[in-house]
Image (spheres, coloured by chain):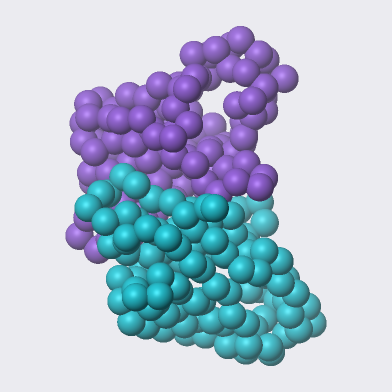
Amino acid sequence: KNEVEQSPQNLTAQEGEFITINCSYSVGISALHWLQQHPGGGIVSLFMLSSGKKKHGRLIATINIQEKHSSLHITASHPRDSAVYICAVRSTGTASKLTFGTGTRLQVTL
Amino acid sequence: DAGITQSPRHKVTETGTPVTLRCHQTENHRYMYWYRQDPGHGLRLIHYSYGVKDTDKGEVSDGYSVSRSKTEDFLLTLESATSSQTSVYFCATYSTATGELFFGEGSRLTVL
């Protein structure tokens, strides 16, 4: 079993839909990162969470440390949100040990 | 934007040749990382650095070496490239002040 599991692996939505991407992990962590990668593009950090909830524009990220689970929500989705979303966890007590999920590929259609 | 640049962005080479990828950052971040990204796998750590001349191996370090002679530059070397090293390579830095990660644009390497 991977230390970081994302679901779903692929997601297609229509413009305007509310989207949720999930990340579950099995190790103790000091932080969780949500990253975005557009096709053929670089990787951009969206959020870094150690507890609670963060919001940036139409994106909301939450984390439940006890349940070892995080969600990324996109409200009023738009075709420009089409990308791969990657969850990564930083293990407790280290700056080196980052474990990445395999990503959720999101396509938002008109 | 942490000002991370990778070079070259694209390279095609032949099996057995040496290859060096360069990562340059302008933010004075202490931690720098090299990852490879392959279909079906999450990003996998090759090597990382926690300061000038301080480096350590990651989970897929075989066939790779690194050097960091200046804070701003982190070099990844494939001494003798193999086809299994065909991949997209990402450099990243970590800000200990904010906990944020910053990634370069990636370097696509093809080994024929």
Chain coloured cyan here: A
**Chain painted purple:** B
**Identity of the residue drawn at 65% across and 69% down:** A8
* In the depicted structure, whether residue A25 falls above or below residue A97: below
Q: Is residue A61 above or below residue A32?
A: below
Residue reaching furthest to the top:
B16
Name which residue lies at 34% across and 75% down.
A66
- Of residues A47 and A57, the one nearer the viewer is A47
**Is residue A38 visible from the viewing direction of this image?**
yes
Q: In the image, residue B111 lies at what x, y percent?
A: 67, 22
Q: Quadrant of residue B16?
A: top right
Q: Quadrant of residue A27?
A: bottom left
> Horizontal and vertical percent for residue B52?
21, 31
At a point 51% along the width and 68% down the height, the residue shown is A23
Seen from the viewer's position, the closer of residues B108 and B36 is B36
Label total for image: 0
Question: Where is residue A17, by image quadrant?
Answer: bottom right
Vertical relation: B54 (above or below) B112: below
Residue pushed farthest front? A1
Q: Residue furthest right?
A: A110
Q: Position of residue A58 (x, y in %)?
A: 52, 85
Relative horizontal placement of residue A105, taking residue A68 as reference (left or right): right
Can you give x and y, in whole percent of width and height, for residue B104 in the image? Answer: 46, 47
- Quadrant containing the N terminus of chain B in the rendered view: bottom left
The answer, for residue B95, to whether it is visible in the render is no
Quadrant location, the C terminus of chain B? top right
Compared across the picture, whether B3 is left or right of B83 comes to left
In the image: residue B6, left or right of residue B72: right
> Relative to B111, is B72 on the left or the right?
left
Q: Residue at the location (72% across, 85% down)? A: A15
* Near-viewer residue (A72 or A1): A1
